[in-house]
Image (spheres, coloured by chain):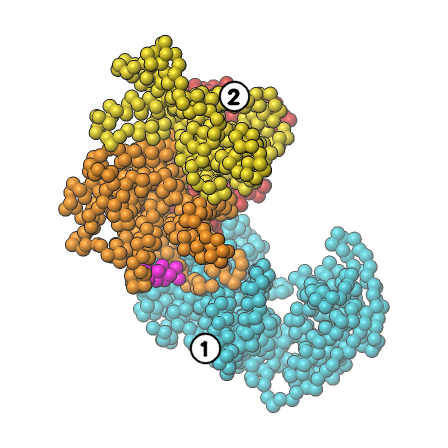
Chain colours: A orange, B yellow, C red, D cyan
Amino acid sequence: MFYRENGQFKSSYREDQQLLGIRQDRWFIFALIAFAFLAVPYLASDYMFRAILIPFLIVSLAAIGLNLLVGYCGQISLGHAAFMSVGAYAAYNLVVHFPQLNFIVVLVLAGFISALIGTVFGLPSLQIKGLYLGVATLAAQFFIDWVFARVKWFTNYSPSGSVSTAQIDMLGWTVNTPVEKYLMVLAIVIVFALMAKNLVRGHIGRSWMAMRDMDVAAEVIGIRPVHAKLSAFAVSAFYAGVAGALWGFVHLGSWEPAAFSINFSLNLLFMIIIGGMGSILGSFIGAAFIVLLPITLNQVLPVMGRWVGMNFSTAFASHLEFMIFGALIIFFLVVEPLGLARLWSIGKEKLRLWPFPH
Amino acid sequence: MAAKKNGPIAALGAVLAAGLLAPLFTGSAPGFYIEVLLGGLMAGVLYSLVALGFVLIFKASGVFNFAQGAMVLFAALALARLAEWLPGWIGIPAGYPALALAFVLAAGIMVAVAWVIERVVLRPLVAQDPVALLMATLGVTFFLDGFGQTIWGSNIYAINLGISKDPTFILPSVFQGGILISKEDLVATVIATALVILLALFFQKTATGRALRAVADDHQAAQSIGIPLNRIWVIVWSVAGFVALVAGMVWGSKLGVQFSIAQLALKALPVVILGGFTSIPGAIVGGLIIGVGEKMSEVFLGPPLVKLWDLAGGGIENWFAYVLALLFLMVRPEGLFGEKHIDRV
Amino acid sequence: MSERDIGEVILDVRNISLSFGGVKALQNISFDVREHEVRAIIGPNGAGKSSMLNCINGVYHPQGGEIAFLGEVRSDMNTHHAAESGIGRTFQNLALFKGMSVIDNLMTGRNLKMKTGLLAQAFHLGPARAEEVRERKFVEHIIDFLEIQAYRKTPVGRLPYGLQKRVDLGRALAGEPRLLLLDEPMAGMNMEEKQDMCRFVLDINDEFGTTIVLIEHDMSVVMDISDRVVVLDYGSKIGDGTPDEVRSNPEVIKAYLGESH
Amino acid sequence: MNGMPPTTADTFPRLLAHHVLVRAERPAIREKDLGIWQTWNWRQVAGEVRALACGLATQGLKRGDHVAIIGANRPWVTWATAAAQSLGAIPVGLYQDATAAELVYVFQNAEIRHAIVEDQEQVDKVLEIKEQAGQIAHIFYGDPRGLRHYIQPELMALTRLKELGRDFDAANAGFIDAEVAKGKPGDAAAMFYTSGTTGNPKGVVHTYAALIDRARAGCELERLTDAEEVLAYLPPAWIGQNIFSYAQALVAGFCVNCPEAAGTVTVDMREIGPTYYFAPPRVYENLLTSVTIRMEDAGQVKRGMFKYFMGVAGRVGGRLLDGAPVSLTDRMLYAIGDLCTYGPLRNALGMSRVRVAYTAGEAIGPDLFRFYRSLGINLKQLYGSTETAVFVCVQPDGQVSADTVGPPLVGVELKIAENGELMIKSPGLLKEYYKNPGATAEVLTNDGWYHSGDAGFLDAQGHLRIIDRAKDVGQLANGAMFAPKYIENKLKFFPFIKEAVALGDRREMVCALINIEMEAVGNWAEKRGLSYSGYVDLAGQAAVFELIRDCVEKVNADLAQEEKLADSQIRRFLILHKELDADDGELTRTSKVRRGFVGEKFSTLVDALYGGKSEQYVKTQVKFEDGRTGEVSATLKIMDAKTFPASRKAA
């Protein structure tokens, strides 16, 4: 309906392969980003930043990472939160031992460390597929949980076992107000999302998808499973690591291993199932969904309770949350395996064909 | 995919065996050693019970049922609460009668659950790639957890099988001080064994059982000889539900019915990896290995480790099972008793 | 195609034997393939044709025998090495990358030629971009060659069977193979599609000088386009030679009697 | 940038040179190839043409020779044309689907020695006729695929030809410029073969002067600039294509876009979004049908919206285009409609950017015509033919209607011969039919008038109306003009009427036999709850008669508007009991009515019509699809239709 594509022809491969091929899409995205940077800081409340926006952005990053692995490369991981914790603790220790390091550097290093661990736990994927791999990653989850819980060195021998971070300082800019934190995270997430998009449209991304869609054929045309799978694990874990570091430093401030439990891993998985396997956009949508659902439930339920004249306990809210998640997972797997992102793209196609139905 | 030689697996076995026997030569009291061993076996029995449900479902529907743990929790909750409520509702005397009736009802409920799952999850997702099904069962897990706690409540409930919790000493003559074990564990073992035998009979002797095996061997074949796949699945999941109920009962009576059961049930995963996804004996043996391994590692490997790296406590049992399974996957993905398969282009 | 110059032997298969847990799929098969020729392997269903291909490009590992490709002798290939040394292949039951567009499928077939690293890719730096464009150009030539311009950006899943077969072929071509293995390229096609496919096979052989080994269970089609034919039956070779020789070979006739084609 | 080139640029090669001077870097031609729109600017085009020209020179192409060009719309077709013209040779476009036999005639007729063809298919065809066609010396091909093993000495790839050309050019600098300098406006620029209905095709010879003058006239009328984009999708051998995508491009200096393949034209059109567009009526018709069909599947809401806003457009759109006054509310409604319906629709049709769209060739239905205009697409009619270098009449903006073809274009004089035939005098007239003075004499009078062969007249506003082929036009008993096809077309524009046969030649009044459109009338009947068993039954229904009578009387109404045709109003009509069918010989294979045959076959009915009966029993043989023959019989009602007094407007 809003698309006017006549005259938007491509006279070079560069143009043809650019990210947002259609002018109207470019406008939309730029408007969105501009809004996020310029308008949101004035519109949103501190609560919004702390409870919604910042967590949303950070888990989006983690979800993107997981999506690269599960959605694009078809390798399941039930232990991604563990890789986040690796990132978080790596960042913590880096800051503890090298206080002078710039936060960005810390982030990246944390990412690399986590990528390393990720690769190690990705090794089984060369031997085993699907379900089996799921268990392997569970092993990662529990083992890493244990390591951080028990090995004092990682927590810098803090008696309680929980760690807390100093304020973030990059190149003189001390990031402490929610708005500042939001802007920093936003910038980082956008950059990483862009990188992810670039990866999946290049030959590396294609080799991942090839492994996902038809691994035998992929090998026959010369794709090395070792490279494809391990690179996917590494990159995915890198994203998780960075997200983990942000989660610890920006969102939590102080945390203990429980902060990155198996449930976190499962939630990440849900984000990409609901949001959309094999879609960067989907990772954002899914993240938004999973972040917002509990909050809305906690807001809405009491109200509804008052209407029907009974009061729902917070316990009930959390149980309901469980049920809804569960139901949604099944619903999407059955009805729309490609998640909300697919619905989005269908909607877009409809707009392009408007007024025709197909 | 399948590992070619059995060298590594032998090596792994050797290491395990060594690990098992090591304590004896590092001068820990044999009595204590045996206690730990038995304790491990008991825990293993429980794992096996859950793993059993796993294997059944995997054999019949090729589904890696992440929700088995949730089913255990759900069944246990149902049993516990019904046993508690029934007397109030229909004035049936509390204790065994109520428990018995509750057991029957709970079994019924699990059948219903199985039926729903087949309708809502399996049938639409039939012939989907296994990972999708795995995730679907994740969904089931969450739903069951939430649903169960919503209707049954989310506190800790007791299941009283009326077995005295006080420990008894056996073979005082052999080891000084004798060996301490709880009746409960013995009962649990008995029940588990009974259940296994029951299932064995079911699979060997009954027509349905044989049908199930046919399905497990080859879906198309099964269908082509006119076995309605959907009904088979309902049955299998019901059986799995029943197994879950038994497991829930035993565990509930031991630890009290609470959310952690669902988490504990995750242990069943490494068990089936060890035993092989398709082998019932595998589930049992695997369960025992894991059970023993955990306890042993916790008791005998933990302290030295803690000392060595100055850890904040042991807790090795949290990951031992998984890491063991992981090693296993590397050298023998099909597990101890599972069968290999080649994928064709 | 008389004026085509058939060259030296580039693939030599020597007494290959393969069995799956007791089932003998191939019993010491030997034959050779010369450069630039179109070589057919025919035989009734279950004669072991696909298994033969799978041995040649290393999907299966034969228990006995050896394979010499371009002089290199190996007891069993590995898929990646096969691809690198110039063996391309299509699949009987379409093994396309369902989630990707036609272009992406072909581009993936090009992966061996693409070397830029993770970081270059992630930041879409000059080299990565240049490479992407360069290979796209190459792939476009294949799209042109196979006349699938209209479907360039359609997800392969949505294409009709006949076209998917073409994309599969295109993906193999993208690797610029010296030896192209075609696994029942005409299976399940109507007469017209079959003729198109024949034309493409001949054109490929002609334009790029690609050596072609193709499998068919339908004799009629193969005979007119191949230079030499191997006939398999129940895992063993029962005939080898020019189409005419093979046609007149009594064993072959026997094997095909009852086979309704 | 959009000034017309100086008059000194009076041949196509010189026009090309001119654009290299003033807009060397602007795109001149694009081709969707290898997935993207490969673009050549004017400088590059000139280079290609130069290379080709020199190449052809090395291959012995001489001034005055004819060069056959057989190909789809590809840049090289344009270049080859210009190259041949640079040498003073005459390009002869031929249709790709031309049969070998047709080629033989043309090759002999034009003594063609050089052929430039697309691909293997065409090469084979030309080689096949080599023997009969005698003197073919050189065949150049664009696409080498499959030709590798051809050893015939005549063959050469265009790429090779260009190489030769470049070397030659380097060796003899100035040669080609000298050749271009020799060209004169009066020289033959191109030759177009018209497949006459009878006998052999005739080669229409056009001079540079003619083609350029007409192209220029068109450009000036529509103020075409070098910013236009056109899509070249019609056969290059057709003069229209040559005018719109070659002559006018070279005059105005705009960019010509070649689609990727026949199968992708619609997509490519959507991508390019041409600003200047030509299509014959049937193309517009097909587009409209596809639109309606696709809208059928749309949801309730969308369909409602579509219906409503098309209504608004019907009311307002045309007027807005013509700059007629429109109320503010209507303007706003139209704006909304434009956002959610017309805009997207134009986008889907690839016509968002169309400034000028032409149709010509046959009469276009008023509804069809109005549909496009109401969408805000400036669709206009023009009149012309191969012999007149297309541009004779064009509807200027603001003076557009469905049934005229507009006033004569600058430089054109029209007069109507006493037999009603349209005579044309224009700078764009053909020079001659090649080697066919007889035929030339038939159409060209000594004082330079051209017999169009069409019957028509200038209406009150001085717009030309084409009513029929002159030979089909007859006279009523009272001597008034009778143009059956014109009347039949008017009837057939109603969706309810499938076929119509108008009778009246040498009779005192006009009567009509009518075929109803089963589907349309069927739906109409169902909406009214009329039940019917089949065609015969439906055709017999009184209500249907009323329906058709309305149509007839509407036709009469606007016939009355045109004094010359006022007497041709339909007095009586009947609805035939069977559908006219080619199998029964009532239609030609190209489904045109065989008026005479029908008249005889249904003579009883005709007599009844003129005999003033009110009904008539009839029985007819029919062939069914499966070849069986059977009989239909029915008693047909015959009705009188209201007629109107001729309006005598002052002309």
Q: Residue at x 22, y 34 (%)?
A: A152
Kindly check if marks 2 and 1 are in contact, taking CB atoms under 8 A apart as contact.
Answer: no
Q: Quadrant of residue D162?
A: bottom left
Q: Please name the residue shown 50% across and 62% down the image.
A: A354
Q: Residues within 10 Å of mark 2 (few under 14, many from 20)?
A: few
Q: Chain of mark 1?
A: D
Residue on which the image places disc 1: D221
From what the image shows, is residue B56 above or below residue C170?
above
Instruction: Look at the image and give the residue range highlighted in magenta.
Output: A23-36
Q: Left or right: where does residue D502 sit relative to residue A49? A: right
Residue identifier under label 2: B194
Q: Residue at x 66, y 87 (%)?
A: D647
- Dominant secondary structure, magenta: helix
* Dot 1 amino acid type: Leu
Q: Nearer the viewer, residue B121 or D63?
A: B121
Where residue D224 sits in the image (x, y, percent)?
Answer: 42, 73
